[in-house]
Image (spheres, rainbow, N blue to C red):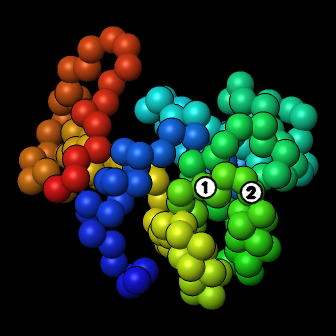
């Protein structure tokens, strides 16, 4: 698989099929990218489980944090990796030891490891590298356009939003 470019349908199928996401490298620091990605995914209705040995036993965004993927008490659909590329092989080893296997391993922006991706793919796990699920969800749902980005229309007026849960959902395109 070419991990330099993904079809919109590949990303959309992943985002539409997963429900439970473990975030490896989750941070309790609200200015860290992993924190606001977790917050966004929770707001979109996903179950998000933080994995961080330094925060184990504590809550991040109201979710119990675990030290290792193997300690998560529910099946995981997707593992979102917020760690350096060098850490990926060990994380993939841990993923391959899970039962049942997650459907997806997602590596965040700048995170890329071809050999680990090949091992995961050989086990039947879909892989995404160097992408952010928050950005991809917003792009495929049309939310980025709401802010005047990539819409061809720039306006100082904010869109009128209804109260409650807001989502157009991910489009396959």
Q: How many marks can you see? A: 2
Q: Considering the numbered disc 1 on the image, is that residue within a helix, a strand or a loop? A: loop
Which residue is label 2 attached to?
Answer: 98
Residue 38, how many percent across, how many down? Answer: 59, 41
Structural distance between the alpha carbons of marks 2 and 1: 8 Å
Classify mark 1: residues with Cα within 10 Å, few (<14), some (14-19) or many (20+).
Answer: many
- In the image, is 78 to the left or to the right of 55? left
As displayed, is residue 123 above or below residue 64?
below
Residue at image point 9% right, 53% down: 152
Tell me which corner region of the image, top left, top right, bottom left or bottom right, holds residue 165: top left
- In the image, is 126 to the left or to the right of 15? right
Residue 140, how many percent across, how many down? Answer: 27, 51
CB under 8 Å between discs 2 and 1: yes
Residue 169, how many percent across, how many down? Answer: 29, 37
Residue 28 numbered mark, or none: none
Residue at image point 53% right, 57% down: 103
Residue at image point 73% right, 78% down: 89
Q: Considering the numbered disc 2 on the image, is that residue within a helix, a strand or a loop? A: loop
Residue 102 numbered mark, or none: 1
- In-front residue for pair 133/72: 72
């Amino acid at each position: 698989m070419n991990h330099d470019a993904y079809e919109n349908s590949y990303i959309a199928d992943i985002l539409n099929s997963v429900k439970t996401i473990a975030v490896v490298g989750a941070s309790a620091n609200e200015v860290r990218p992993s924190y606001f990605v977790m917050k966004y995914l929770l707001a979109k209705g996903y179950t998000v489980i933080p994995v961080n040995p330094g925060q184990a036993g504590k809550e991040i965004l109201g979710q119990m944090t675990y030290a290792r993927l193997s300690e998560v008490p529910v099946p995981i659909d997707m593992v979102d990796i917020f760690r350096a590329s060098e850490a990926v092989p060990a994380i993939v080893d841990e993923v391959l030891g899970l039962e049942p296997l997650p459907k997806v391993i997602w590596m965040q922006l700048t995170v890329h490891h071809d050999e680990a991706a090949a091992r995961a793919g050989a086990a039947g796990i879909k892989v995404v590298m160097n992408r952010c699920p928050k950005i991809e969800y917003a792009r495929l749902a049309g939310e980025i356009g709401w802010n005047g980005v990539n819409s061809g229309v720039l306006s100082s007026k904010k869109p009128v939003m209804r109260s409650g849960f807001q989502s157009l959902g991910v489009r396959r395109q």
